[in-house]
């Protein structure tokens, strides 16, 4: 079937901002386009769990009045935005994808407050894997979010609803969270851009926790520049430097970390080298990749178990069965492993940082496979069996362990499904991720679909 295409497909925030300021559209009109697209497309794709039509229309009228009166809050002023249902929006339900919660948030999360200060209009809340505890995006009290490229396939998770809403053109921008890849994984599987900033760059106040020392607010958009524009609105002025020089990029062989579909690796490498030219190849030490995985698992499991200990004891039946099994497993993680893992993090960050000795940016696939089918939990990758969840997290979670920023951008398709290029840098050099991504577009254009 054709990929759903809403009114924001192919439109950028820069373009919308020009149209608003030059009188070709209004925020009220953009919000109505978003609401109409959600009404048409969401029954199939299930990207949204709450739509705030009245609140969005009122906010759009205020945005239009401000612009007409000469008050311009910046490029997001009047632009409709979706917010993951793990992030509090005052007056809207916050279920976290679970039957455990049915209440309404009393205050905006800090990141939502900053979006509103920048003039963005919140359309509603997007679907999430229950409690964000899964990279597949198909276990939620609201049902699975569905991949717009093929609705029988996963969106990826846990920010699947945000990725689907952007990929289908329902909104131009959405907030997500990323604890082990939860922005970048659905971005790659749905063919959009997803940015995970450095740990702590955007405050997580008002965001329901999964694993507090990994949790990061991130952004999803159709174009990496839109992620950059939104990021600048969420961090203090001057936080993002730009020294005007191109980054030195290296290819990080994904097979040193996890099995990878050879077609995915070839397609992604061609996409980045189209802009950079041939890249030096770096190998990730296998023992270090194993230690990063073990460290991630020990920390995430321990911190997640702490978040849900009371719910697990008092109302286990309200969890999705698969999520319940994972939470119970997490609760069995020995405390000594958590302590050792936390002690190992500074050493691992230093060791991973050494990969950037002669380079500023590392390039690799975001995910080593294309979108699996909904409910699929095992597959074959490069000639051997793998667990789907492990495969989805394999190339993203290590950057959460060390807190480095990472950007996923579309890199073409394999067998008709999108694949993502992941660009990683050290904290403080985020601008080079966006410059590297833009280099390929400028020289050779976006890799064609199909």
Image: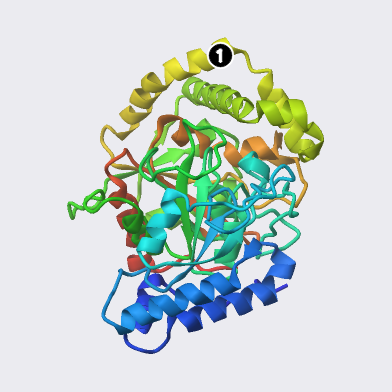
- Label 1 sits on residue: 337
- Quarter of the figure with the N terminus: bottom right
**386 to the left or right of 213:** right
Above or below for 326 versus 150: above
Q: Name the residue at 49% across, 18% down.
A: 341
Q: Name the residue at 52% across, 56% down.
A: 90
**368 to the left or right of 15:** right
Q: Name the spot of residue 311 as percent of width and height, x first.
A: 71, 31
Q: Name the residue at 27% across, 42% down.
A: 428
Q: Name the spot of residue 174 as percent of width and height, x first.
A: 50, 60
**113 to the left or right of 386:** left
- Secondary structure under the numbered disc 1 in the rendered image: helix
Q: Nearer the viewer, residue 158 or 109?
A: 109
Kindly indicate the quadrant of the structure image that contains residue 99. Answer: top right
Q: Name the spot of residue 101 as percent of width and height, x first.
A: 69, 45
Q: Name the residue at 50% across, 75% down.
A: 58
Above or below for 16 versus 320: below
Kindly indicate the quadrant of the structure image that contains residue 6. Answer: bottom right
Number of numbered callouts drawn:
1
Examine the rendering and report whether any part of residue 408 can be seen. Answer: no
Colour mode of the rendering: rainbow
The residue at the far top in this view is: 336
Examine the rendering and report whether any part of residue 399 can be seen. Answer: yes
Q: Nearer the viewer, residue 369 or 203?
A: 203
């Amino acid at each position: 079937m054709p990929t759903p295409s809403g009114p924001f497909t192919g439109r950028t925030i820069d373009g919308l901002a020009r149209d608003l300021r030059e009188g070709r559209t209004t925020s009220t009109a953009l919000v109505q386009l978003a609401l109409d697209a959600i009404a048409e497309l969401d029954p199939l794709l299930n990207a949204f769990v709450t739509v705030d039509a009245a609140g969005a229309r009122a906010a759009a009228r205020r945005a239009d009045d401000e612009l007409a009166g000469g008050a311009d809050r910046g490029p997001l002023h009047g632009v409709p935005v979706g917010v993951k249902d793990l992030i509090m929006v005052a007056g809207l339900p916050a279920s976290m994808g679970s039957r455990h919660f049915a209440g309404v948030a009393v205050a905006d999360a800090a990141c939502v407050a900053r979006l509103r200060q920048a003039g963005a209009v919140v359309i509603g809340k997007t679907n999430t894997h229950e409690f964000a505890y899964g990279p597949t995006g198909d276990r939620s009290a609201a049902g699975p979010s569905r991949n717009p490229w093929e609705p029988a396939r996963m969106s990826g998770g846990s920010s699947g609803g945000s990725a689907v809403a952007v990929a289908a053109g329902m909104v131009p921008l959405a907030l997500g969270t990323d604890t082990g890849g939860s922005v970048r994984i659905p971005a790659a599987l749905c063919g959009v851009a997803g940015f995970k900033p450095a740990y702590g760059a955007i405050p997580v106040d008002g965001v329901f926790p999964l694993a507090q020392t990994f949790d990061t607010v991130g952004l999803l958009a159709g174009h990496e520049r839109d992620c950059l524009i939104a990021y600048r609105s969420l961090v203090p002025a001057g936080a993002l430097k730009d020294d005007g020089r191109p980054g030195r990029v290296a290819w990080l062989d994904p097979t040193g970390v996890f099995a990878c579909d050879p077609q995915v690796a070839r397609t992604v490498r061609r996409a980045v080298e189209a802009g950079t030219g041939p890249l030096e190849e770096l190998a990730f030490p296998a023992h270090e990749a194993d230690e990063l995985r073990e460290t991630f698992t020990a920390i995430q499991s321990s911190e997640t178990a702490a978040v849900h200990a009371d719910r697990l004891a008092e109302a286990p039946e309200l969890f999705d069965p698969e999520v319940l099994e994972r939470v119970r497993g997490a609760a069995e993680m020995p405390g000594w492993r958590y302590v050792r893992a936390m002690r190992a993090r500074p050493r691992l960050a230093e060791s991973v940082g050494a990969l950037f000795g002669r380079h500023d940016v590392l390039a690799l696939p975001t995910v080593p496979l294309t979108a699996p089918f909904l409910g699929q939990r095992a597959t074959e990758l490069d000639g051997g069996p793998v667990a789907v969840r492990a495969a989805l997290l394999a190339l993203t979670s290590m950057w959460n362990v060390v807190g480095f920023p990472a950007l996923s951008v579309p890199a073409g398709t394999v067998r008709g499904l999108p694949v993502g290029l992941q660009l990683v840098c050290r904290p403080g050099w985020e601008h080079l991720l966006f410059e590297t991504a833009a280099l390929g577009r400028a020289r050779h254009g976006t890799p064609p679909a199909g």
